[in-house]
Image: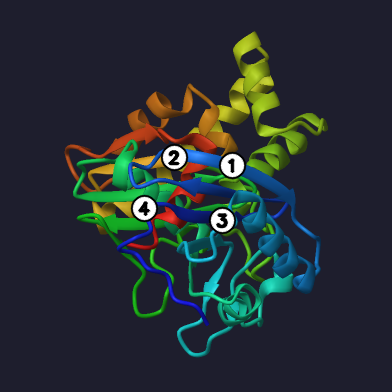
Amino acid sequence: MKCCDLNQASNRIGIDLGGTKIEGVLLDSAGDIKRRDRLPTPQEDYPGILDAISALIALLTDDKHLPIGIGTPGSVSPLSPVMRNSNSTCLNGKHLLGDLEQHLDRAVRLANDANCFALSEASDGAGKDSPVVFGVILGTGVGGGIVVDGKLIQGPSGVSGEWGHNTMPEVEDLKRGRECFCGRLDCVETWISGPGLAKTYATHSRKTLSALEIAALDVSGESMARQVLDGYFEQLAGALAGVINILDPDTIVLGGGVSNIERLYQEVHSRLGKYVFSDHVGTRIVKAQHGDSSGVRGAAWLWP
């Protein structure tokens, strides 16, 4: 296996392995994206995913010595070298890191996609200069990552920040019983992800709309959209309060499709006081500075 010469390599490669697309960037030492490409993610096709990542890297550069960081759904088990907890279920049980290094013939660093997002925003994004950053992805799923003094915290079990699979707290009259892909009921992810919000709206209105379509109806004055979003903000505030009570981060950075709902930030922060065990909530809740590029940029920053 070829090693990467980090002293000579000012550029680096970041890959974000998503459920529908694989995005790659060539990043320079200043954090600027020099090239970006995307390929569709082969569905339930593990060998196809390895081939697609290899093809994407070839599109970015022909330099065989640049460091490669990859953000993935799920994480590597600390008990064995295989993947676990991925909602892209074909990755679970696979030795993804070893297979990639063999496929690419060079060293690779791997981290959970939410960890990559948090690292990017803490390094030079919306959480820059904050000692403790909790990065949150509100998208197809719900993930989280913790960065303290610029360093990613993963923990001995490798699940630091995985608040999406805590049980949704009792913040309002929820009609419980939502099944999560992980096998549990009523994980935070089943309620405050994009599909979770869409499901709540569909339950009340019998209409199937995306999270951003619901937000647009709210802006136009539809009362049902307003009611559902108000409930969603309450749920999100209750779930984040659990994180604040334990971690008390300086900044919470939100990314993913749901983070584009502009009313969210003021509404959620104003509700935190009901759930946080303090007479003052000093944690900022802000939108990701790098938007959809945060995860792939953070993957590139996995190398020092």
Amino acid type at mark 3:
Ile
Choose between 298 and 264: the one closer to the eye: 298
| Dot in front, 1 or 2 | 1
The alpha-carbon separation of the residues under discs 2 and 4 comes to 29 Å
Q: Quadrant of residue 290?
A: top left
Q: Which numbered disc covers residue 36? A: 1
Q: How is the image coloured?
A: rainbow
Residue at the location (75% across, 38% down)? 203
For image coordinates 51% across by 81% down, the residue present is: 77
Relative height, residue 299 to residue 137 (above, below): below
Kindly identify the amino acid type of the residue bearing the numbered disc 2.
Answer: Leu
Compared across the picture, whether 260 is left or right of 41 comes to left
Q: What is the CA distance from the residue labelled 4 to the residue labelled 3?
A: 17 Å
Residue at 52 percent of width and 89 percent of height: 80
Answer few, some or many: residues within 10 Å of disc 1's Cα (few below 14, many 20 plus, some between 14 and 19): some
User: In the image, which disc is placed on residue 136?
Assistant: none
The residue beneath circle 2 is: 254
Between marks 1 and 2, how big is the CA–CA gap? Answer: 23 Å
Mark 4 or 3, closer to the camera: 4
Residue 217 visible somewhere in the drawing: yes
Tell me which residue sits at (59%, 36%) in the image: 257
* SS type, badge 3: strand
- Kindly report which numbered mark, 4 or 1, lies closer to the viewer in this rendering: 4
Residue 15, label in figure:
3
Which residue is outermost to the top?
A: 220
Q: Amino acid at mark 1?
A: Arg
Q: CA distance from mark 1 to mark 3?
A: 10 Å
Label 4, on which residue?
A: 10
Q: Is residue 110 above or below residue 290?
A: below
